[in-house]
Image (tube, grey):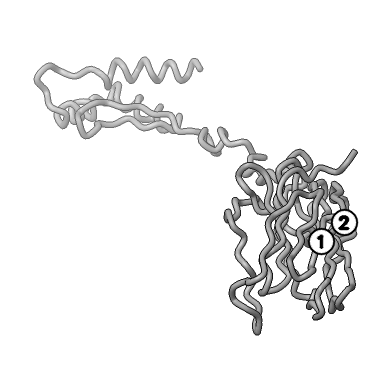
Amino acid sequence: MQFHESVTATLTEGVGTRRPGGDASRSCGARSRSRSRTGVVVLALLLAGGTAGCSSDGSDAAASPSPSGSSAAASVSPSASPSPSASPTGGGPVPTPGPSVIPKVSRPGQPSKPTITAGPATFSRSVTYSDGITVKVDKVTAGVETGQGPGVFAGREFAVFTVTMTNGTTKPIDAQQVVLTSTYGTRGLMAERVYAADTGAVDFGGQLAPGASVTARYAFAIPTKQLGDVRLVVDFDGAHTSAEFDGDARPAS
């Protein structure tokens, strides 16, 4: 510190003084000819690693360089790194609002527009068609995913719908083509199918013979607190409108 203060004092006396009316080049030239003072200043600045000279606007400058590893580098923590994206527990894909009317599935060789209709029902009632087909939600159970693996989100809540279809017609129904869709909440968010083993889900399949019934289990990612406002649509062929269930789907206590 004493050496630095001595250099600064010498610089102030010998370099920093300029004559009134003198330009920058003359000031620099005069100082360069003052061997008794300026020579000492230059030597001291070189030893200190500094620089003294005439700036482009005629001002004098003295600067002390930063040590190896500049202050900019020192201001960055060596352990600093981008924080990983936070994933909510049991997240899964973010749901988006579904259409107000779930469109019918297009099936080759079947009518493009249904001719046999039935109105929607609550989850405690069945949807019944005039030709004898009935669809009913037997029960709804809530659960939480606990497994691991592709497509599994541990901690995600889901609802399992146990659905029974009865064929009261004289023709078989291809249950392999049954498609279920569900939405929930005031915004009608699309519920994703859940295939985790702990859901016990079993899809419809095969041929449903006349007079026979078949039961299946479908799981959807629906938060338990949203089960009070749910829509479940069962689309089983092209000739019938889809069986729709709306309302409170909370499991019976």
Q: Determine the residue positioned at 29% across, 25% down.
A: 38
- Where is residue 168? Give x, y as percent: 83, 71
Q: Is residue 18 left or right of residue 14?
A: left
- Where is residue 122? Give x, y as percent: 75, 49
Q: Residues within 10 Å of mark 2 (few under 14, many from 20)?
A: many
- Where is residue 227? Give x, y as percent: 76, 43
Q: Is residue 55 above or below residue 21?
A: below
Q: Quadrant of the C terminus?
A: top right
Residue 133: quarter of image: bottom right
Nearest the eye: 155 or 37: 155
Asked whether disc 1 touches disc 2, contact meaning CB atoms under 8 Å apart, the reply is: yes
Say which residue label 2 marks.
Answer: 199
Q: Is residue 191 above or below residue 216?
A: above
- Where is residue 69? Give x, y as percent: 55, 38
Please give the count of numbered marks on the rendered protein: 2
Say which residue label 1 marks.
Answer: 195
Residue 77: quarter of image: top right
Q: Determine the residue positioned at 72% across, 61% down.
A: 243
Q: Residues within 10 Å of mark 1 (few under 14, many from 20)?
A: some
Element on which disc 1 rests? loop
Q: Is residue 121 left or right of residue 69?
A: right
Nearest the eye: 134 or 183: 134
Q: Of the residues shown, which amino acid type is indicated by label 1?
A: Tyr
Element on which disc 2 rests? helix
Spatial CA distance of label 1 from label 2 is 7 Å
Q: Determine the residue positioned at 84% across, 60% down.
A: 163
Q: Determine the residue positioned at 60% across, 64% down.
A: 103
Q: Of the residues shown, which amino acid type is indicated by label 2?
A: Thr
Judged from this view, the residue extending furthest toward the bottom is: 109
Q: Is residue 25 above or below residue 5?
A: below
Nearest the eye: 111 or 21: 111
